[in-house]
Image (cartoon, rainbow, N blue to C red):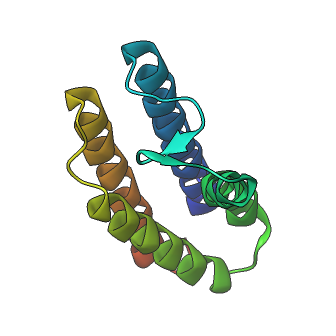
Amino acid sequence: MVDVRIILSALWGSLMLVYLLGDVLRIFAGDYKVGELAGVPASQWMWVAVAACMLTPIVMIVLSLVVPYPAIRWVCIVAAAVWIVFNLMGLPYPGAYDNFLIVVSLVVCGAIIWYAWQWTAVG
């Protein structure tokens, strides 16, 4: 059986790729305006905040593999729940592809929570 740590790490990696795909599609669809976030000119600090936020799934890939149980179980549950709330606050997006990918990300976050919740010290 595959270790829960590997599954969680893969789910966090999948979440990161879903977000990256959304960003790439947004650029190619022309729904992206250079230098703006939500129609507002973005400062360097806003871009740092975006980078820190989007770094979360990448950090969680590593943490899922190295942080001891049961701490990582709760870190995964809380982080995925925060992403669910964050994504729901942004709905709806103008592009159908964006809304579709947000739904996919909600499913992935749900899977992260489910796997972490079901995780026991034995398995």
Residue at 54 percent across and 83 percent down: it is 74
Rendered view: 99 above or below 45? above
Q: Is residue 26 left or right of residue 49?
A: left
Task: Find residue 31 and report its image quarter.
Answer: top left
Rendered view: 90 above or below 31? below
Compare residues 59 and 9 and report the one nearer the observer: 59
Residue at 56 percent across and 51 percent down: it is 12
Residue 64 shows in the view: yes
- Residue that lies at the very extreme toward the front in this rendered image: 41
Rendered view: 31 above or below 88? above
Compare residues 53 and 15 and report the one nearer the observer: 53
Where does residue 6 sit, x and y in percent of width and height? 63, 52
Where does residue 102 sit, x and y in percent of width and height? 31, 45
Compare residues 10 and 95 and report the one nearer the observer: 95
Where does residue 49 sit, x and y in percent of width and height? 66, 61
Q: Is residue 100 left or right of residue 22?
A: left
Look at the image and tell me in which quarter the C terminus lies: bottom right
Residue at 64 percent across and 58 percent down: it is 46
Compare residues 83 and 72 and report the one nearer the observer: 83
Residue 121 shows in the view: no
